[in-house]
Image (cartoon, grey):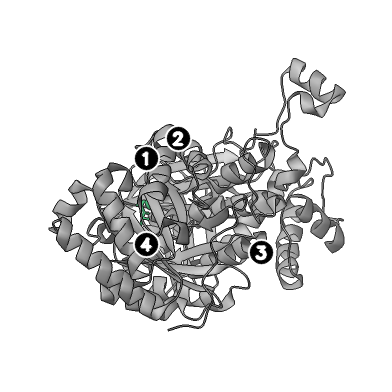
Amino acid sequence: MTSSASEAPSPQDHVLIFDTTLRDGEQSPGATMTHAEKLEIAALLDEMGVDIIEAGFPIASEGDFLAVSEIAKNAKNAVICGLSRANFADIDRCWEAVRHAKRPRIHTFIGTSPLHRDITALDQDGMVSRIHDTVTHARNLCDNVQWSPMDATRTERDFLCRVVETAIKAGATTINIPDTVGYTYPRESADLIAMLRERVPGADEVIFATHCHNDLGMATANALAAVEAGARQIECTINGLGERAGNTALEEVVMALKVRNDILPYRTRIDTTKIMGISRMVAAVSGFPVQYNKAVVGKNAFAHESGIHQDGMLKNKETFEIMRPEDVGLAATNLVMGKHSGRAALRAKLSELGYELGDNQLKDVFVRFKALADRKKEVYDDDLIALMAEASMADEDAYLQIRRLRVICGTDGPQEAELTMSIGGEEKFTDATGDGPVDATFNAIKMLFAHDAQLDLYQVHAVTEGTDAQATVSVRLNLDGVIYSGQSSDTDTVVASAKAYVNALNRLVLHQHRGNLSALMSSAG
Ligand code: KIV
Ligand code: ZN
């Protein structure tokens, strides 16, 4: 048994923030992240004050296991949690990964609704005994154990009370109530937590958590309703990333608790000024851009364009602003950077944009900034955001890397691409033609790295205005129904396209070494 202290039930006015961007978020089709990206996101989550980080699903693959172990070793304050199905092998593997943390947690789950009981071929008694055995096993390894009845909102109420009671008696310290398919409604979400707290013996000894999916757009409302009814842990992800329509968005619940503290008198430990920085980082590495009008972190969340709004804002910001941009790490500045801007100016500017860099990181980003400023007279905020995304995705160990690309274009004939790539450490060269420079480049990549993935999406958008603007290219590949996305920015659209394509292929390669997470989840039991 570990010596790490389990958390005392959260004080009544404190809500724990459990972030599952690296587990549920990473399960979004196409959102596979590299090892280095996971470590960086975990460090940012820890720094911003997330109480519990669900770092992955250790049994899913060697890669998941290593990521969870390393995140556990590096964590400074956060509890590090791993997911496991309801069997001893999963739980043992999870413990092996999280045990390195100062504060480890095992999270184990089983689908309890009639549909899930059919899948696992367990009747009610069989399921109760499985829960008893697996939670007891987890608790013998770790004194901080979270248990979840998957699809709780579609589980018969009496049976739900019975399984929750079993998990508590077996030693679970947190009981998480998932709305796995995003089916519940705020009043129902509150009633469910209230009912469990009232009916289940031992309920006062544990923390109740809420885990909502956003299929009907009610995840944030459902999570907050659960808090009003006594839940003291919200499970959420940055940008609301997650399976299908995603999970409750961390930035939404945290800012709602802050802005509407008059009616939701609860505190979190989150440093909200870190929100924008981590939101951009997650958007970049997951390949899921944030929608422009997304609450809190969308590009337009603090933009005021109409005349009436601008007039009101000039007279009194509170006319149309319920939170200040700086509260979420967004500083309004018009300072344009250029090739004469120094390192200190770059650091200050990036800090205003929500990125706090260490000296080594700044060194690397400064080199990239200088290269960009050489090609582009004026470097705007959006250029720097794209540059930071590019820097965070740079992976020196990536399987596929572009070494050199030369494209020959003309009005009279097929375009030609000459490409040198490193593939698993070996340099290879080819040339190819195509219907346009991007087509020629993609053909060359495919000649060097043959694969069967289909190109589902190729999208270009200008980061700023002007003919020297950077282009951000998004690519989505589909292999047997599994999506792999890649993104890249450059002042040269063809280079950005090549890098985005290779980025998506690297994620495909990475995924081939892992199990299919969704399949693992649906066989939970
Ligand atoms: O949505 C869900 O039910 C889950 C569980 C594993 C907690 O993600
Ligand atoms: Zn989930």
How many numbered discs, if any?
4
Q: Which mark is residue 218?
A: 2
Measured Cα–Cα span from mark 4 to mark 1? 19 Å
- The answer to which of marks 3 and 2 sits earlier in the sequence is 3
| Contact? badges 2 and 1 (CB < 8 Å) | yes
| Contact? badges 2 and 4 (CB < 8 Å) | no
- The answer to which of marks 2 and 1 sits earlier in the sequence is 1
Measured Cα–Cα span from mark 3 to mark 2? 28 Å
- Which amino acid lies under the numbered mark 3 shown in the image of this protein? Glu
- Which amino acid lies under the numbered mark 4 shown in the image of this protein? Trp
Ligand 1 closer than 8 Å to label 1 CB? no
- Image depth: mark 3 or mark 2 in front: 2
Left or right: where 208 falls relative to 382? left
- Image depth: mark 2 or mark 4 in front: 4
Measured Cα–Cα span from mark 1 to mark 3? 30 Å
Q: In this view of the protein, which residue sits in the foreground, 52 or 13?
A: 13
- The answer to which of marks 1 and 3 sits earlier in the sequence is 3
- Image depth: mark 4 or mark 1 in front: 4
Q: Which mark is residue 47?
A: 3
